Image: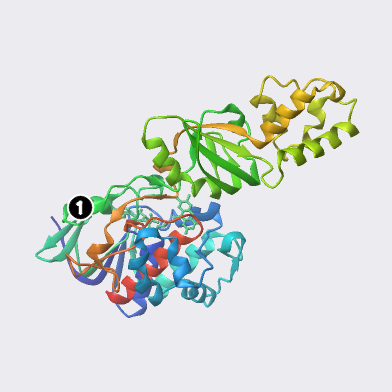
Amino acid sequence: MKNNNKIWDVIVIGGGAGGMFAASIAGSRGKSVLVLDKNKNLGEKLKITGGGRCNITNNEPDIHKMLKVYGEAAPFLYSPFSIFGVKDTFKYFESRGLPLVVQARNRVFPVTEKALDVFKILEKEMEKNHVVVKSNTPVRRINVKGALIESVETNNGLLYAKSFILATGGMSHPETGSTGDGLKWLRDIGHSVKDSSPDIVPLAVSDNWVKSLAGVSLSFMKITFYKDGQRQFSKTGKILFTHFGLSGPLILNSSKKVDDLLQNEGKVTASIDAYPDTNEGKLEESIIKVFDNNKNKIWRTILKEIVPSGMQKAIEFIDLSLDFNIKVHSITKEDRKKFVKLLKNLPVNITNLMGYERAVVADGGVTLQELDMKTMSSKLYKNLFIIGDLLNISRNSGGYSLQICWTTGYIAGMSV
Ligand SMILES: Cc1cc2nc3c(=O)[nH]c(=O)nc-3n(C[C@H](O)[C@H](O)[C@H](O)COP(=O)(O)OP(=O)(O)OC[C@H]3O[C@@H](n4cnc5c(N)ncnc54)[C@H](O)[C@@H]3O)c2cc1C
């Protein structure tokens, strides 16, 4: 195998959000840095974050509150977040000409709402700091010598460095290049890696009425999940209807618990309350008013005045015993009550979680106990630094994943 004689200060494997950030930080310290990525272009996943708008972090400057989101990983993250936290993310991007804005649920976006602008900042920083990028260069394996990483193997032969930053990401959206290679290598060299499963992921459902609403997003809905008819938990927020089922922040952040429900035998269902802040009695009163004002009209023609915008067509699919072709004055009290109940309990049958291809992040990763969190270095191989989605840190959607990339990328870049 061809040997490339140069010994880099740092080789970064994977040029996603974490890898690019870490590379530019290491470069800013005068280190010679080489980034290797198997894709033609870097940052493919970063460019699709937040639906192309990039939810860059979450505006929670209180470390204690922020870290609650990371569950069992929280105790490991105090030190990293006190080195580079949310305020530092604001400072880093804003001082480089990318103003940020806080939106609903404390989510932070670039004012331009373009993920590409975040990518461009990282690209510019790498260039400024003389980082060398070799794209179209898949790494095949990492080679160990004693308690150190010695080289990486590519199509172009072996490449050597004093330190290696592993930033190959997790397994969600594999078309962006994240296919779990790093997780396999870490296992091979003796690290404990928790198995991966799709996390923060949309739900597949069997109901045609849901699919008929593909593209509609309704902002104030309550969804309650059931296992074999037994109530499990409820959440209120925005639901996005898709051609395969349900998505949107509310659903994504429920997916972990739904996954647990799907693990054992039994039927998992849900019901959506389209009017969570109105009880059945009040809802019926307001519907009666609409009916009184439209007695001679056909029921289906006035649905738009009652049901949430965009839902009129779907509602006709759900309960076929209701005939929306009759005149309003012919609606029986029984059917009116049935209609009210329907709007408070739209039925959903959950069949599955969508797979890696639609997951925002995949669960699992290297066990944090095996890392020195003040440097992000492996306790088994002192010159190996592990960052971003490779770490076993569960979290919700809301900017928390990219903040992990900035935090751990900064620390690794400063420590190599
Ligand atoms: C649709 C979607 C939307 C998201 N939106 C948000 C959001 O708004 N806010 C948020 O905080 N998080 C969001 N996330 C999560 C966030 O994108 C990830 O947490 C983040 O990109 C992880 O960065 P990373 O650098 O660890 O890995 P990645 O971004 O996955 O980068 C890994 C890189 O390694 C390269 N690579 C892999 N294997 C090899 C190999 N063998 N050789 C060479 N290179 C290799 C890949 O090509 C890739 O470029 C979203 C994720 C998805 C899928």
> Looking at the image, which residue is at 40% across and 58% down?
42
> Looking at the image, which residue is at 75% across and 24% down?
335
Q: Would you say residue 308 is visible in this rendering?
A: yes
Q: Which one is nearer the viewer's eye here, 364 or 159?
A: 364
Q: Is residue 63 left or right of residue 151?
A: right
Q: Quadrant of the C terminus?
A: bottom left
Q: Is residue 329 left or right of residue 198?
A: right
| Rendered position, 388 above or below 340 | below
Q: Where in the figure is residue 162, as x and y percent of width and height? A: 20, 71
Residue 10, by quadrant, is: bottom left
Q: Secondary structure at mark 1?
A: helix
Q: Quadrant of the N terminus?
A: bottom left
Q: Is residue 410 left or right of residue 358?
A: left
| Rendered position, 73 above or below 252 | below
Q: Would you say residue 130 is visible in this rendering?
A: no
> Looking at the image, which residue is at 69% across and 19% down?
321
Q: Which one is nearer the viewer's eye here, 207 or 224?
A: 224
Identify residue for label 1.
187
Q: Where in the figure is residue 152, as x and y percent of width and height? A: 20, 59
Residue 76, by quadrant, is: bottom left
Q: Where in the figure is residue 148, as x and y percent of width and height? A: 14, 67
Q: Where in the figure is residue 110, as x and y percent of width and height? A: 57, 65
